């Protein structure tokens, strides 16, 4: 048997009996137990993991681990992250992530790789070419969505995403703010989703 890992948690009781738990330093990893020969891309397994992930988040906030990491007894792969994850979980145990992905009216063209002499220069230009949302919409989002911290991310040249670290008690207010934004900006397509476990902010060092 192997464990398809879902996330890292502060306490074992945050996991059981919803999922299996395995110790990793002074944290605990949650996961779904499967046979060794079980393909990780199996649709039923993916659905089972998604349902378990949602049930775990209902219990307590955790750091999400990218799908595809499976363990038996050895958790050394996550060892370099454990101290940072513990600090993050202790600081934001009562917070979750919400995301708002918005389309832009005029996507910027991607830079041509042939115009650059080095990969680093191309990557910098690619990042700078990221789309920008209507500044009035962005200002309204930042004013209306209550959050501890936010991060705008240019995912591609046609959309931007705001990740927000939100107190659990403010999730309903964020959803209400999304409804108000739809009424105020009917021409700006966007999707507000969540709550999610800590993913974007799992890299925070603050």
Image (cartoon, helix red, strand yellow):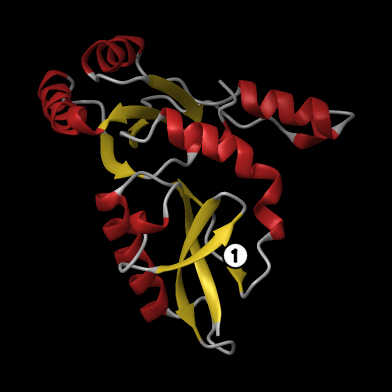
| Label 1 element class | loop
Which residue does the image show at 33% across and 15% down from the upper left?
A: 138
Relative placement, left or right, of 14 versus 201 is left
Whether residue 191 appears in this view of the structure is yes
Residue 134, how many percent across, how many down?
Answer: 35, 16
The quadrant of the picture occupied by the C terminus is top right
Residue 154, position in %: x, y? 51, 29
Report if residue 157 is visible in the image: no
- Crowding at label 1, few (<14), some or many (≥20) Cα neighbours within 10 Å? some
Drawn side of residue 178 relative to residue 64, left or right: left
Q: What residue does disc 1 label? A: 69
Position of 122 with respect to 66 (left or right) is right
Compare residues 133 and 11 and report the one nearer the observer: 11
Snapshot quadrant of residue 47: bottom left
Q: Position of residue 171 (x, y in %)?
A: 20, 33
Residue at 49%, 36% in the rendered image: 200
């Amino acid at each position: 048997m192997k464990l398809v890992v879902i996330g890292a948690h502060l306490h074992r009781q945050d996991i059981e009996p919803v999922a299996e738990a395995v110790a990793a330093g002074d944290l605990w990893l949650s996961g779904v137990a499967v046979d060794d020969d079980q393909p990780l891309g199996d649709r039923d397994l993916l659905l089972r993991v998604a349902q378990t992930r949602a049930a775990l988040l209902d219990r307590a906030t955790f750091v999400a681990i990218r799908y595809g990491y499976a363990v038996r007894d050895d958790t050394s792969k996550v060892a370099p992250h454990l101290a940072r994850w513990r600090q993050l979980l202790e600081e934001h145990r009562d917070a979750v992530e919400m995301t708002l992905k918005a389309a832009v009216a005029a996507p910027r063209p991607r830079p041509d790789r042939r115009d650059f002499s080095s990969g680093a220069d191309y990557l910098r230009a690619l990042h700078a070419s990221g789309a920008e949302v209507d500044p009035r919409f962005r200002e309204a989002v930042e004013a209306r969505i209550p959050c501890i911290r936010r991060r705008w991310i240019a995912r591609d040249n046609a959309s931007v995403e705001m990740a927000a670290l939100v107190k659990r008690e403010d999730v309903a207010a964020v959803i209400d703010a999304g409804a108000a934004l739809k009424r105020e900006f009917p021409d700006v397509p966007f999707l507000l989703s969540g709550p999610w476990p800590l993913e974007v902010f799992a890299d925070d060092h603050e």
